[in-house]
Image: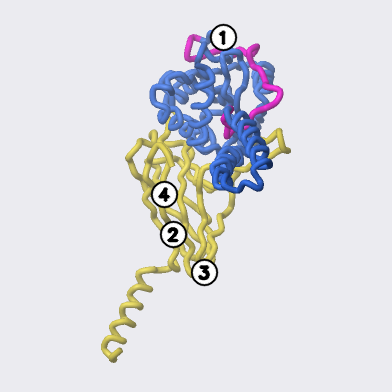
Amino acid sequence: MNQPVPNACIEPMVSVEAKPVARGETATLRTKPRILIACLVGLLLLLASCSEPQLAGMVRQPTPNVADVTLPDVTNGGREFPTIAQESRLLAVYFGYTQCPDICPTTMADLRSAVEDLGTEGDRIDVAFVTVDPERDTPERLASYIQAFFDDGIALRTEDPARLAKAAASFGTIYEVTKADDGSIDVAHSTLLSVIDSQGNILVQWPFGTTADDMRSDLKILLKRRT
Amino acid sequence: MNRTSTVVLALGMALALTGCGGNAGIQVEDAWARTSASIQDAGAVYLTIKGGTGADRLVGAAVPSSVATSAGLHETVTEGDEGAQMMMMQEVEGIDVPAQGEAKLEPGGYHIMLMQLAEPLETGSQFTVTLTFENAGTMEVVVEVREDQ
């Protein structure tokens, strides 16, 4: 989706550079400037549209806002944590569970490598992990899990199913924990990783499969907008 | 080509075939597992299987009890409608390996799930997984533990 934009930015420049070749043709001198002006106007319009770099992740319209969501932060004595970033920072929020062997660790590891690649800029990103399986994810387990990926990772956990469901819905995420007769537990969950600003706006959401490179480039664009 | 070299060649080919055993040329590459968080109970092994001369099917995987209580073939699947999609895991009976083709076990697709890890999977460590193929029989593969793909 964002692919055509860089091309559109380059092509008009090529056509403008090619124009001077026609200067010597006096017969068409009157029409040439018009074409040139039209090209320049087109180029300016295109440049204007290019000035806002495109994000690789999903950008929802209208922008969802999660400023009114708070969840207990078990990495901070259970204090209520509003899901908004601190001033000039970004907050990434993920709904998952610690017994998830494939999707959750892959997403967290990709985010970690994106943040690490940003160097000192990456220090402006906070990460919160909300468990959708509070029964098995004790506060200790959850905190230890997220902090294995991010030293200052924030672990959010509520035992109130209605509260969890409401918070998840604000993020546009869903989940389902089912217990089988043999006692095994299956967890299904949306795999969106959301990035939030200090107003609680969800700026971008990455579905599973978003590469660490795309995450890094999106974070870079979003951090730039916040300075 | 003289007679002696023909014989040597034939012997060499015979030896090569014996070396393949019952594996029919099937090969496993890049077996790895992600470093696990200290409290993580479950892990996943990813690898690429290069098919041999005939089609085959991966039907089982096992690890020593010093690694995990059990191992199984799993697939991460997406369920639900557009806009309300969730991902979950399900057990699979087997993973097809096409002749001369390949089967990939990778994040978001198939994986060998390790249940009840005995110890956290530490970066740089290795362990062995025994794969069972329908035709090729069993094969031991060394799995490398690392943080990223």
Q: Is mark 3 on a helix, strand or loop?
A: loop
Hey, what amino acid is under mark 3? Gly
Kindly indicate whether the residues beneath marks 3 and 2 are on one polypeptide chain: yes
Which numbered dot is residue A66? none
Residue A146 rendering spot, x and y as whole percentages: 47, 24
Identify whether A31 is placed above or below B3: above
Mark 2 or mark 1: which is in front? 1
Task: List the residue tagged with mark 1.
Answer: A80
Residue A220 rendering spot, x and y as whole percentages: 49, 27
Give the CA distance from mark 2 to mark 1.
53 Å
Q: What element carries label 4?
A: strand
Q: Mark 3 lies on which chain?
A: B
Name the outermost residue toward the front: A26
Residue B115 rendering spot, x and y as whole percentages: 48, 39
Which numbered dot is residue B31? 4
Hey, what amino acid is under mark 1? Glu
- Region in magenta: A52-77
Q: Is mark 1 on a helix, strand or loop?
A: strand
In this structure image, what is the colour of chain A? blue
Task: List the residue tagged with mark 2.
Answer: B138
